[in-house]
Amino acid sequence: MNILIFRVMEKIKEQLEQMGYDYAVAIATKSEIENGAACGQLSIIVETE
């Protein structure tokens, strides 16, 4: 996995943990948000050993 992607995932995971959330996030483009579209991409962050 690309180290940059890994670091971003870890940061998101840490922030979600601190706020008491599980590790699923929806990613949407600016256009999707502005138009109220519900077609963002769902990302589920999982830990592997």
Image: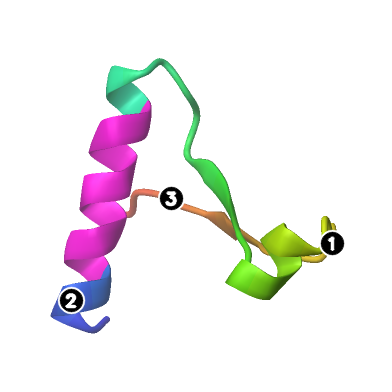
Q: Which residue is mark 1?
A: 37
Q: Are marks 2 and 3 in contact (CB under 8 Å)?
A: no
Determine if residue 29 is in view.
no
Residue 13, percent from left and from top = 32, 41
- Identity of the residue drawn at 73% across and 68% down: 32
User: Can you name the residue that lies furthest to the front here?
Assistant: 34
| Mark 2: few/some/many CA within 10 Å (<14, 14-19, 20+) | few
Circle 2 or circle 1, nearest the eye: 1
Amino acid found under the numbered disc labelled 3: Val
Identify the mark at residue 4; answer none if there is no mark.
Answer: 2
- Identity of the residue drawn at 63% across and 64% down: 28
Gap between marks 2 and 1 measured at Cα: 28 Å
Q: Earlier in the sequence, mark 3 or mark 1?
A: 1
- Identity of the residue drawn at 60% across and 69% down: 30
Q: Is residue 14 left or right of residue 24?
A: left
Amino acid found under the numbered disc labelled 1: Ala
| Element type at mark 3 | loop
| Vertical relation: 39 (above or below) 10 | below
Quarter of the figure with residue 35? bottom right
| Element type at mark 1 | loop
Q: Which residue is mark 3?
A: 46
| Vertical relation: 33 (above or below) 20 | below
Q: What is the count of numbered marks?
A: 3
Residues drawn in magenta: 6-16
| Element type at mark 2 | helix
| Vertical relation: 3 (above or below) 41 | below
Gap between marks 2 and 3 measured at Cα: 16 Å
